[in-house]
Image: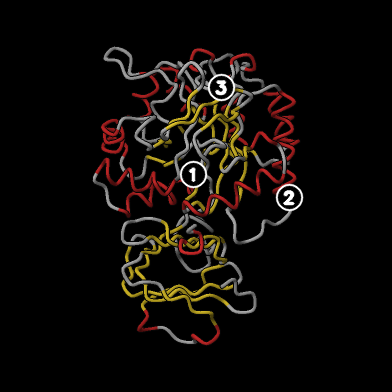
Amino acid sequence: MNATFKGILLKGIQVYSEGKWIENGYIKIKDQKIVELGRVETLSEQEKFEVIDVPPQYKAVPGFIDVHIHGANGADTMDATAEALTIMAHALPAEGTTSFLATTITQEEKAIEKALVNAGKYMKDPQEPGKSEILGVHLEGPFVNPIKAGAQPLPYIIEPNLELFKKWEQISNHTIKLVTLAPEQSGGLEMIRYLKEKGIIASIGHTDATYEEVLNAIDAGANHITHLFNQMRGLHQREPGVAGAALLKDELKAELIVDGIHVHPEMVKLAYKQKGKKGIILITDSMRAKCLKNGHYDLGGQDVTVENGKAVLSDGTLAGSILKLGKGVKNIIAFTGCGLEDAVEMAAVNPAKQLNVFNRKGSLSEGKDADIVILDENLDVYMTLCRGKVAFLKEENVK
């Protein structure tokens, strides 16, 4: 099925392309790209392609993009090895994730630097099709507020330091695409201005900023919120806080962990009603325990206990998730009553636009990367193609 000499033809399927459904559709793939799509009645030159027939009730949607993920299947970005990133890249297509930002955590400078150097080296060479593509690094911490540390290790939290960041930018081979920081900390606004200038997403997170301080951060160039509602100043009738600003300001795209644990389903519904499909980016914030059994795992040098779908530190603090992005897509549909089209906007279109890669990812259209997720009648991931190569097929993975 991994055609090397031929292209691939997906045939007889519902295709979601640029906001519309194509019934009884087809997608032609060659050289990692979508070269043609349309209705089967108009199909010609099939013999040049390896045909994959798909049940007609199944749906083809663009591959999901996870901009906030620490680890999966026993591996973590902070392991700082090519093997760890490869393990993550191989595991993620099973949940429909075809590209992602490898996310760091607050740690001592040397540990962060090792992870950044590793990601920079990994991305220097072309990444093989058939696995999830790393689009860059999400630097979460250490420039956060200790009051809202959550699972970010307190001893290593520091104030925003532009000189240090410039060094990290250099050693990462300029692969840092998104930075979570607390704008109210000394040097925060200066760093946001610099990030804006460099085309790096400045995200407000792990923060005790007031509403006014968030407005100042927006003026400086911040346009993103890290895991809305989690580890931030909440909504209060006399101080809208970070959460209030996130809900009110269209300039801010808000990440949301829709596992039913980090954010109550009704709060997910509130966020969706207020921000709409264009204002939310679905993420997992998952750690290495995703895809593994209950037990004890490491996150940023801390012991994490995973039980019944929940990952916590010894004091009960939530420590990332074990959510799969495909499940997050199903959950937001269940929690809000939105359509699959809206969920795709939040899982694929919005992150692609925010990362400035919508010219090649985030939707199914001619000329774009063949990052395709096929969902069955229950909206579970049946097949995933990463840049034109089958990376996951449900039946082949049943044990």
Comparing labels 1 and 2, the label whose residue is closer to the camera: 2
Residue 103 picture location, percent across and down? 59, 36
Extreme residue toward the left, this view: 337
Identified by mark 3, the residue type is Gln
Front-most of residues 118 and 216: 118
**Mark in the foreground, 3 or 2:** 3
For disc 3, the marked residue is 152
Q: State the quadrant of the N terminus.
A: bottom right
Residue at 54% x, 62% y: name it. 369
Name the residue at 64% across, 37% down: 77
The label on residue 354 is: 1
- Please, what secondary structure does the residue beneath circle 2 have? helix
Between 257 and 302, the one lying in front of the other is 302
Residue 124, position as x, y percentages in the image: 73, 50
* Residue at figure coordinates x 67%, y 56% from the top left: 127
In this picture, residue 35 sits left or right of residue 137 = left
Circle 2 sits on which residue? 124
Q: Position of residue 168 (x, y in %)?
A: 71, 31
Amino acid carrying label 1: it is: Gln
The dot on residue 376 is: none
